[in-house]
Image (cartoon, rainbow, N blue to C red):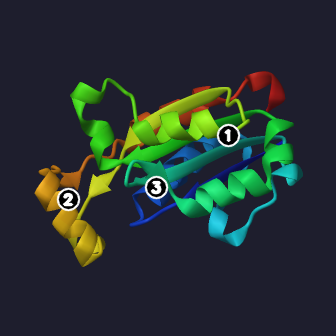
Amino acid sequence: MSVLLAYATHSGATRTLAEAMAAALEEEGREVVLADVADDPDPAQHEAVIAGSAVRGESVEKSFARWTRHHGEALAARPLAVFTCSGSAADPAKQGRQRAMDRFLEWTPLRPVATANLPGWVLMDRIPAAERALLRAMGTPTGDFRDLAAAARWARGALPTATL
């Protein structure tokens, strides 16, 4: 049985988390198809889906929102786990919460079986100048906050094993 691991990335961190998740699932013997939502992968071709989005301006990527709306029926018909990736997810004050995930869950009719808000990176050389200025003004910490092992652990437990 196959798992679609679809992602929307802004500066590449979400892709690296998705790659770590895919490798972990493949180590367990699962068939995984890793795809950027920009390539419009079809979730109907898979038994389960893990979908992730970078966070920009406290929202999921527009391409991720469009993809989930476009494939809503297929996503609702199979186990779906959703994650976000942002530098701010490393902030202990957030206690694992992410406004982008909360907003996504408010407007989407989808009901994921698991969600996670995973730390990414804030690397100024990968961010457009206008966004850099805003992040500096907000006092956003910079650096690479990813924990690829934690992302892999989450993916291993995110989907019901009976479906895989």
* Sequence order check, earlier mark of 3 and 1: 3
Residue sitting at x 39%, y 67% = 11
Relative image position of residue 6 (x, y in whole percent) = 64, 54
Residue sitting at x 71%, y 40% = 29
Are there few (<14), some (14-19), or many (20+) residues within 10 Å of tag 3?
A: many
Residue sitting at x 37%, y 27% = 96
Relative image position of residue 87 (x, y in whole percent) = 29, 48
Position of 8 compared to 42: left or right?
A: left
Are there few (<14), some (14-19), or many (20+) residues within 10 Å of tag 1?
A: few
* Sequence order check, earlier mark of 1 and 2: 1
Kind of element beneath mark 1? loop
Residues at circles 2 and 3 in contact by the CB criterion of under 8 Å: no
- Of 72 and 156, nearer the camera is 72
Amino acid type, residue under disc 3 in the picture = Thr
Amino acid type, residue under disc 1 in the picture = Thr
Q: Is residue 27 above or below residue 19?
A: above
Residue 3: name its quadrant.
Answer: top right
User: Where's the C terminus, which quadrant?
Assistant: top right
Toward the front, the furthest residue is: 107
The residue at which mark 3 appears reads as 14
The residue at which mark 1 appears reads as 108
